[in-house]
Amino acid sequence: MRLVVKLKICFNIINIFLFASLCIIISTPFIAKLYAEKAQAFEANYRWGNADKMYKRAIALDRFNAIYINKYGSFLSKRARCQKEQLAGLEQSLHMHKRALALSSKNAEYWYHSGKDILDIYKQSRAIGTKKQSLDSAIYFFKQAIKYDPWNFQNNYLIGWNLLKIYNDIGAAGQEFAMDCLKRALEIRPGKGPQYIYPMVMHYTRNFDIIIRITPNSLSGYNNLYSYIKKYNLWQYRKRVIDKLEYYHEKEDLKSFIENAQIRNKKMENISKAYNSWQGVADNSKNEYKDGNMYWSGAAHLAVDIPNTPSNITIKARGSKAKDIWPYMIVELDGEAIGENFVNSKDWTEYTYEVKGSKGVKVLSVTFPNDYCNTINGVREDRNLYIGGVRVESIIESDREGQD
């Protein structure tokens, strides 16, 4: 009888122990999660000490949770950037991110954070005269991040941005990789180009060829690039972009392309019969141009008689600048571009464009795309374009040979 009682007591003790263990096993992740959430709240308010304690407690309770380890690494990196001596904190951050990678080797976010730590350590160590990490190592980690999640916008954008900041240090292969990342970012979110990616590329590289390189080969891609040119008054690159834009317009939306061409041709035909002086309407459809004075963005037209030989069309123009940028003039003949340039003088200046012979009355058009007006501290700035007389001269072959 006593033996049975003792066995029952032992059995109850074991059950209690197992139940308690089960409760601990079940509750530990929840407790760890609470600590992690508290850590993030402290971090958001820059309470570094409290956040550090909470992260450590969360990891102590859930040692194999890569998410907490990665977040702790990111916290250490963030804290390091707010300190005068950053190197030690960045090295601790890298250790935690690599620890997270050891638990989840195919997580692109962990690869990115490790690469970013290596890059920051490289920059810090270079600043104090040592070299503890290599750029090749950082690029390797970045490539792994793209390998495991190639269409992640944030990773592509951030990797491209971080590499752009040291563009001249990463070599040709690194530069190609950075451009590939930015191109993918634009393919994922094309609208980010005009506002973020294109200005960033021009700021760090001053090279428009790179912008062309990363622009998605599509109608929407070049529409966004054209928006960037308009926004930042980079009209000197317009010709390169408009040719691509028209190519993709014809390729992707042939019906619309043909309709626009028909509308343009009909418009040119009507203008050629009526416009004996510069006439036109601003883009706002409210203001009309008079005597070639273009006070608003838009296009002015003039009917001209073209001989059946190659000819020079010379236009007199002058401008007023604002924000140190002169008016831009796009010149077309019957809707086909024949030249474009900044009118960078307040005095009347002649601008000459060569056209092929095509006898008949044609429509000469001048488009002014970059109007601007503002008053700052009582000083008024107003960018305007003024167009005057036009001269059409046949090019004699002997003159052409003499010029050659």
Image: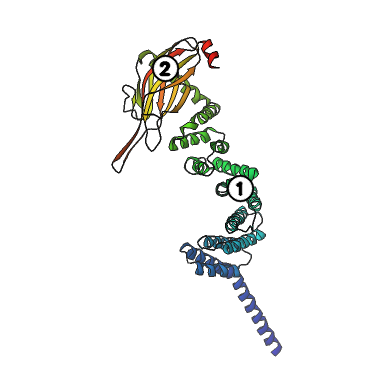
Q: Which numbered mark, 2 or 1, is in the foreground of this view?
A: 1
Name the foreground residue: 10 vs 151: 151
Quarter the N terminus occupies: bottom right
Name the foreground residue: 4 vs 272: 272
Name the foreground residue: 88 vs 64: 88
How far across and down, in percent of the image, does residue 57 sit?
56, 70
Q: Which residue is mark 2?
A: 363
Query: What element does badge 1 sit on?
Result: helix
* Residue 156 visible to an observer of this rendering: no
How far across and down, in percent of the image, does residue 375 sit?
31, 40
Tag 2 and tag 1, C-beta contact below 8 Å = no
How far across and down, in percent of the image, does residue 239 sit?
50, 28
Q: Which residue is mark 1?
A: 169
Most extreme residue toward the left is 378
What is the crowding at mark 2: few (fewer than 14 residues within 10 Å), some, or many (at least 20)? many
The earlier-in-sequence mark between 2 and 1 is 1
Most extreme residue toward the bottom is 2
The answer to whether residue 214 is above or below residue 266 is: below
CA–CA distance in space, label 2 to label 1: 52 Å
Query: What element does badge 2 sit on?
Result: strand
Q: Quadrant of residue 177?
A: top right
Circle 1: residue type: Asp
Quarter the C terminus occupies: top right
Circle 2: residue type: Val
The answer to whether residue 207 is above or below residue 398 is: below
Left of 157 or right of it: where is 1? right
* Residue 241 visible to an observer of this rendering: yes
The answer to whether residue 93 is above or below residue 147 is: below
The answer to whether residue 324 is above or below residue 293 is: below
